[in-house]
Image (cartoon, grey):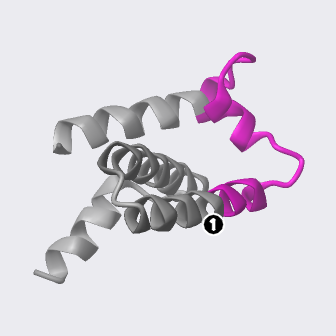
Amino acid sequence: MDDTLEALFAVIEDRKETLPEDSYTASLFTHEKGENAVLEKLGEESTELVLAAKDDDREEIAHEAADIVYHLLVLLSMKGMELSDLEAELEARR
């Protein structure tokens, strides 16, 4: 999974730099609401994950969890953080 997260974070960082017009990720970096757009998405996806878990819908749980991870990585990138910052914090909690 580390490779998947690293690859995804690399794509997010690339989209932040190149800002392709047809990229959802780039649109988050240029959104008129700024980082609030990502924060709102994190709240929305969290609610959707809770509802999927309540319904015991494994497919939807995986889908919403992936949405949360993606938007979390976008937020880390917005804040100038690296994936290693998250990994270090998780490692410290072992």
The location of residue 74, given as percent across then percent down, is 54, 49
Which one is in front, 27 or 81? 27
In this picture, residue 19 sits left or right of residue 49? right
Q: Residue furthest right?
A: 32
Q: Is residue 72 visible?
A: yes
Q: Which of the 4 quarters of the picture holds residue 40? A: bottom right
Residue at numbered disc 1: 43
For label 1, the SS is helix
Q: Residue furthest left?
A: 94
The 10 Å Cα crowd at callout 1, few under 14, some 14 to 19, many 20 or more, is few
Residue at 71% x, 42% y is: 29
Q: Position of residue 34 (x, y in %)?
A: 80, 54
Q: Is residue 26 left or right of residue 63?
A: right
Spot occupied by residue 55 in the image (x, y as percentages of width and height): 41, 61
Please state, as top left, top right, bottom left or bottom right, where the C terminus lies in the image.
Answer: bottom left
Amino acid of disc 1: Gly
Q: Is residue 22 magenta?
A: yes
Q: Residue furthest front?
A: 55
Compare residues 60 and 84 and report the one nearer the observer: 60
Q: How many marks?
A: 1
Tell me the residue at 65%/23% (across/down): 23
The magenta stretch spans residue 6? no
Name the residue located 31 percent from the left edge and 32 percent from the top edge: 7
Up-down relation of residue 49 to residue 60 (above or below):
below
Residue stretch rendered in magenta on the structure: 16-41
**Residue pictured at 32% horizontal, 65% vertical:** 86
Prevailing secondary structure of the magenta residues = helix
**In which quadrant is the N terminus drawn?**
top left
Image height of 77 relative to 55, above or below: above
Left or right of 32: which side holds 72? left
| Horizontal and vertical percent position of residue 8 | 38, 35
